[in-house]
Image (cartoon, rainbow, N blue to C red):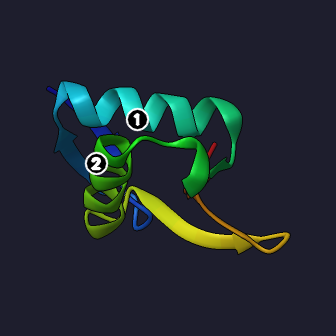
Amino acid sequence: MRTVSTNQGYLTFINNIEARVFDKIKCHDFVSVNSLTEAEQHNADQLVQKNVLEKINRHEQTGYRAYSTKISL
């Protein structure tokens, strides 16, 4: 289990499988749906429902992107 911040800034728990998908998408900034396996797509959709990832269209491709977090100083 691990905690990540949502788009509103709250912390939420994600399991290890969801964390692998989250790290993959966060590392690449944008991952197309076509490059993910069916299980990874399901986990990414679960993260969209938790407001951790967003599903967007970029250059006529549908994919996932992690919300950018702003740090207040």
Query: Which residue is at a point 27% across and 37% down the rendered structure image?
Result: 18
- On the image, the x and y values in percent for residue 17 come to 23, 29
Q: Quadrant of residue 56?
A: bottom right
Quadrant holding the C terminus: top right
In the image, taking residue 3 as reference, residue 54 lies left or right, namely: right
Estimate the x, y position of residue 45 in percent, counting from the top left: 33, 61
Residue at mark 1 to residue at mark 2: CA–CA distance: 7 Å
Using a 10 Å C-alpha cutoff, classify the residue at mark 1 as few (fewer than 14 neighbours), some (14 to 19) or many (20 or more).
some
Dividing the picture into quadrants, the one containing residue 26 is top right
Which circle's residue, 1 or 2, is located before the other in the chain? Answer: 1
Q: Is residue 71 visible?
A: no
Q: Secondary structure at mark 1?
A: helix
Q: Amino acid at mark 2?
A: Asn
Name the image quarter holding the N terminus.
top left
Q: Looking at the image, do the residues carrying marks 1 and 2 touch, with CB atoms under 8 Å apart?
A: yes
Residue pictured at 69% horizontal, 43% vertical: 29
* Residue closer to the observer: 56 or 6: 56
The amino acid on which the numbered mark 1 sits, given as a three-letter code, is Val
Residue at label 1? 21
| Percent position of residue 72, x then y | 60, 49
Q: Which residue occupies 49% across, 43% down?
A: 36
Q: Which mark is residue 43?
A: 2
Q: Nearer the viewer, residue 12 or 23?
A: 23
Query: Where is residue 19 drawn, in percent x and y?
Result: 32, 30
Q: Is residue 36 visible?
A: yes
Secondary structure beneath dot 2 equals helix
Apparent side of residue 22 relative to residue 56 in the rendered image (left or right):
left
User: Relative to residue 73, is residue 10 depicted above or below?
Assistant: below
Identify the disc placed on residue 9.
Answer: none
Callout 2 crowding tier (Cα within 10 Å): few <14, some 14–19, many ≥20: some
- Which residue is painted at 40% across and 35% down in the image? 21
In the image, is 8 to the left or to the right of 32? left
